[in-house]
Amino acid sequence: MHEWQVWLVAALLLFVAEMAAPGFWLLSVAVGCLAAGLVSIVVPGVLAPALTFAAGTLLSLFGIRPFLLQRIHPTSSDIKTNVDALVGKVGIVAERIDPATGRGRVLVEGENWRGASLMDTPLEPGTRVMVVRVDGAILYVDKES
């Protein structure tokens, strides 16, 4: 087996192994192997492919890997979780929401929450509402339009 074939087989195996390993580490090494394999076709010897392998791996670690990680994993500020994820959801008034007393309940995604109306008008049970904002355990709702 020729030297360039060894590099290319190693690159192929690392590409396949990357599918099971997170983080694109093996992909960076596979890119280095691929570059070294291509150089070893043209330049005989060990030094040029080895230097190409090192350079290709480092360049892909600092160039390709951050780009892929940014595209695949969104930043944490883009993902709404817990009660923050309820903003914009539609619910149904379970217990009359009375702005005068500040009492009322809203059923959103199968969970019963304290509800408050953003308007000065009461909301009757069965009314479809949309969650506008969340303050602690209180959902501020408005009639769905």
Image (tube, rainbow, N blue to C red):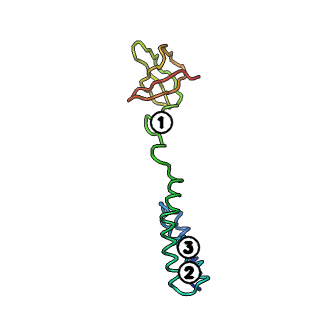
Q: Are marks 1 and 3 in contact (CB under 8 Å)?
A: no
Number of numbered tags placed on the structure image: 3
Q: Give the number of the disc on residue 85.
A: 1
Q: CA distance from mark 2 to mark 1?
A: 51 Å
Relative to 83, residue 44 above or below:
below
Q: Earlier in the sequence, mark 2 or mark 1?
A: 2
**Where residue 101 sits: x, y (%)?**
39, 13
Residue at the (48%, 17%) spot, across then down: 119
Q: Give the number of the disc on residue 102.
A: none
* Residue found farthest to the right: 42
Q: Are marks 2 and 1 in contact (CB under 8 Å)?
A: no
Relative to 42, residue 33 above or below:
above
Q: Earlier in the sequence, mark 1 or mark 3?
A: 3
Q: Amino acid at mark 1?
A: Ala
Q: Amino acid at mark 2?
A: Val
**Where residue 47 sits: x, y (%)?**
50, 84
Residue annotated with mark 2: 6
Residue at the (46%, 16%) spot, across then down: 96
Relative to 27, residue 104 above or below:
above
Residue annotated with mark 3: 11
Q: Earlier in the sequence, mark 3 or mark 2?
A: 2
- Quadrant where the N terminus sits is bottom right
Residue at the (46%, 30%) spot, across then down: 111
**Where residue 54 sits: x, y (%)?**
48, 75
User: The residue tagged with tag 2: helix, strand or loop?
Assistant: helix
Query: Is 5 displayed left or right of 25 in the figure?
Result: right
Q: CA distance from mark 1 to mark 3?
A: 42 Å
Estimate how packed mark 1 is, as few (under 14), some (14 to 19) or many (20 or more) residues with alpha carbons within 10 Å. few
* Residue found farthest to the left: 136
Q: Quadrant of residue 102?
A: top left
Q: Quadrant of residue 12?
A: bottom right
Q: Nearer the viewer, residue 17 or 45?
A: 45
